[in-house]
Amino acid sequence: MRSSAYVLLAVAIVAEVVATSALRASEGFSRVVPSVVVVIGYSILFYLLSLTLKSIPGGIVYAVWSGAGIVLITLVAALLFKQIPDLPAVLGMGLIVADVVVLNVFSKVSPH
């Protein structure tokens, strides 16, 4: 059951990355297609997150979702929009990833 919840969480993260990337292309919701992608992407994201909370603690879900989202959105922004993060940004993201690892591997809150 937990492994399927992590699959749902992974799909939710992908939906967030797609929706957040489409935000820039929507130009303040003035372009229809990217705006629809944003609304559908975030709808999928929050529905799937609600399902993951049935078997994974909320703090863990939020840590994984936000950590992975930050890193993946930064990668997409670097590749598509040439927004290259500087060294402090990369170090900060490394700390976020380390936090997610510590929560999932060492914390008693995490469902091992």
Image: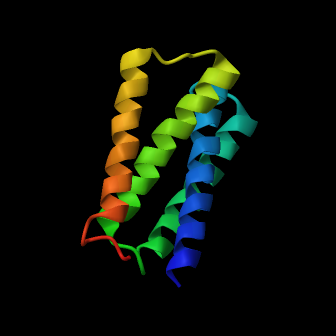
Q: Position of residue 60 (x, y in %)?
A: 35, 63
Q: Is residue 12 above or below residue 17?
A: below
Tag count: 0
The answer to whether any part of residue 87 appears in the image is yes
**Most foreground residue, 16 or 30:** 16
Query: x, y percentage for residue 106?
Result: 29, 64
> In the image as oriented, which residue stretches furthest toward the right?
33
Q: How is the image coloured?
A: rainbow
Q: Position of residue 59 (x, y in %)?
A: 30, 62
- Please give the name of the residue rendered at 43% of the width and 25% of the height, measured from the top-left corner: 90
Q: Is residue 29 visible?
A: no
Residue 105: where, in percent of width, then height?
35, 63
Residue furthest to the bottom: 1
Is 106 rendered above or below residue 66?
below
x 48%, y 65%: residue: 49
11 versus 74 height, above or below:
below
Examine the image and state in which quarter residue 18 appears: top right
Is residue 104 shown left or right of residue 28? left
The residue lying at 59 percent from left, 43 percent from top is 17
Whether 25 is drawn above or below 87: the answer is below
The residue furthest front is: 106
Tell me: 5 left or right of 35. left
Give the residue displayed 33% in from the left and 67% down from the top.
58
Assign the C terminus to one quadrant of the image: bottom left
